[in-house]
């Protein structure tokens, strides 16, 4: 029961963090996934944990390689993270692959929605500047929401009826 509570707290924290800063939210979500994996019953394969672990490391490494101005920027992050969360939730109702695809589509739509606002005009949609910014902020959101959705599946399956 302790691992379920800890996993839930970590997952909620990761989702909330992705709305404010995207660098370490994926790491917190991965810790939540690992805590959920300690619950008794069926588990993900080692390959699945390795995949999400590598994805988390890539997100963190890319976060360090971003130019400081882009790394500090929070422009549109609530739109992108909110879109990824909504897409993940919709995909969660279908399958694991739909969960990941939904998070991706949601992040893209959230980025486009922000670019259409007066504050988002600086991203110059549809240029390479917009695409670069969307990749810099969208990839961490997609990975974080996908990991959180994967862990949510484990928690739901393991939850006592």
Image (cartoon, rainbow, N blue to C red):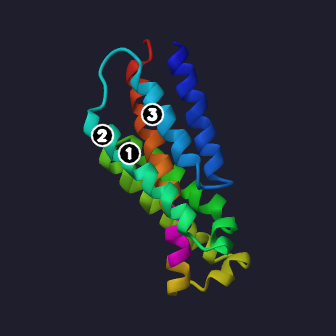
19 displayed left or right of 51: right
**Numbered tag placed on residue 52 in the rendering:** 1
C-alpha separation, residue under disc 3 versus residue under disc 1: 9 Å
Q: Are marks 1 and 2 in contact (CB under 8 Å)?
A: yes
Rate crowding at label 2 as few (under 14), some (14 to 19) or many (20 or more) other CA atoms within 10 Å.
few
- Magenta-tinted stretch: 132-138
Q: Going from the N terminus, do you reach mark 3 or mark 1 first?
A: 3
Question: Where 151 falls versus 133 (above or below)?
Answer: above
Secondary structure at numbered mark 3: helix
Label 2, on which residue? 48
Viewer-proximal residue among 117 and 158:
158
The answer to whether residue 126 shows anywhere in this view is no
Viewer-proximal residue among 119 and 47:
47
Counting from the top left corner in percent of width and height, residue 57 is at 45, 51
C-alpha separation, residue under disc 1 versus residue under disc 2: 6 Å
| Residue at 52%, 44% in the rendered image | 27
Q: Are marks 3 and 1 in contact (CB under 8 Å)?
A: yes
Rate crowding at label 3 as few (under 14), some (14 to 19) or many (20 or more) other CA atoms within 10 Å.
many
Q: Quadrant of residue 151?
A: top left
Residue 79 magenta: no
Label 3, on which residue? 33
């Amino acid at each position: 029961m302790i691992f379920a509570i800890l996993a839930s707290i970590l997952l909620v924290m990761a989702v909330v963090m992705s709305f404010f800063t995207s660098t370490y939210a994926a790491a917190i979500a991965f810790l939540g996934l690992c805590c959920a994996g300690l619950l008794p019953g069926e588990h993900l394969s080692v390959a699945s944990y390795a995949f999400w672990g590598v994805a988390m490391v890539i997100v963190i490494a890319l976060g360090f390689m971003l130019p400081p101005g882009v790394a500090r920027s929070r422009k549109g992050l609530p739109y992108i993270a909110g879109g990824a969360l909504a897409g993940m939730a919709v995909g969660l109702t279908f399958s694991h692959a739909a969960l990941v695809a939904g998070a991706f589509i949601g992040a893209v739509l959230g980025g486009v929605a922000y670019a259409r606002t007066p504050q988002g005009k600086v991203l110059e949609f549809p240029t390479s500047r917009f695409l670069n910014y969307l990749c810099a902020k969208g990839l961490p959101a997609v990975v974080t929401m996908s990991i959180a959705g994967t862990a949510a599946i484990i928690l739901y399956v393991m939850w006592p009826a």
